[in-house]
Amino acid sequence: MTKRGQGQGKGRERQEKYERGTRSYTMSHIRATNTSIEVLVRRYLFARGLRFRKNDKRYPGHPDVVLPKWHAIVFVNGCFWHMHPGCSKHSMPKSNVEFWSAKLLRNRERDVAQHKALEAMGWRVIVVWECELAKATREERLERLYSEITASVPASEARIDARVESVEPRT
């Protein structure tokens, strides 16, 4: 037999994971750069011989990885913070719903605007989601990322080819 007030019955209140005031403190310590998934992606690309700049502030959105030779930019997005559609890792918090929905929608809208700006500048934008880096699918996704980056001719070689064509006489 259970006593009333021990979490049983109709008047049951939801047990909070954090004490009042500690959730905000905990959330404020989530890093914006050098997250474990970013480091994982960068280590893989470096091991495959790709050289890049990280978190370059010259570009909209401060991309996680900038590969100038390949004219490609990689964003490594957390499913929660960037509202990955259809992903089990993204769910709207149950408390303070108005705040969180506004914040996460702003993040998504900002991402779309930044990607359009980068594409207008001639960059190829590639997004890697946190859920794609789960152990079961990690290797496949990283290999696909490498092929997405290296699929086109490097930007430096494309410029050289264009110069050679303009110098050679046409027949």
Image (spheres, helix red, strand yellow):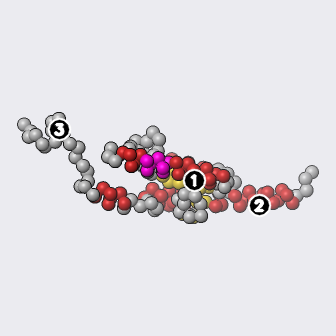
Q: Is residue 55 above or below residue 10?
A: below
Query: Which residue bears the numbered disc 3?
Result: 11
The dot on residue 160 is 2
- Of badges 2 and 1, nearer the viewer stands 1
Point out the tag, 2 or 1, that comes first from the N-terminus: 1
- Of badges 2 and 3, nearer the viewer stands 3
| Callouts 2 and 1 close, C-beta under 8 Å | no
Instruction: Look at label 2 and name its amino acid.
Output: Ile
Question: Please, which residue is most extreme toward the left here?
Answer: 1
Q: Which residue is painted at 15% across and 38% down in the image?
A: 8
Instruction: Look at label 1 and name its amino acid.
Output: Gln
Q: Give how far across and how far down residue 65 sits, in percent.
A: 55, 59
Residue 1 drawn in magenta? no
Q: Bounds of the magenta span?
A: 102-108
Q: Which residue is painted at 46% across and 61% down in the image?
A: 33
Q: Which residue is painted at 79% across and 57% down in the image?
A: 162
Question: Please, which residue is most extreme toward the top here?
Answer: 10
Q: In the structure shown, which secondary structural element does the residue marked by tag 1 occupy?
A: helix
Query: Which residue bears the numbered disc 1?
Result: 114
Point out the tag, 3 or 1, that comes first from the N-terminus: 3
Q: In the structure shown, which secondary structural element does the residue marked by tag 3 occupy?
A: loop
Q: Is residue 10 above or below residue 119?
A: above
| Callouts 3 and 1 close, C-beta under 8 Å | no
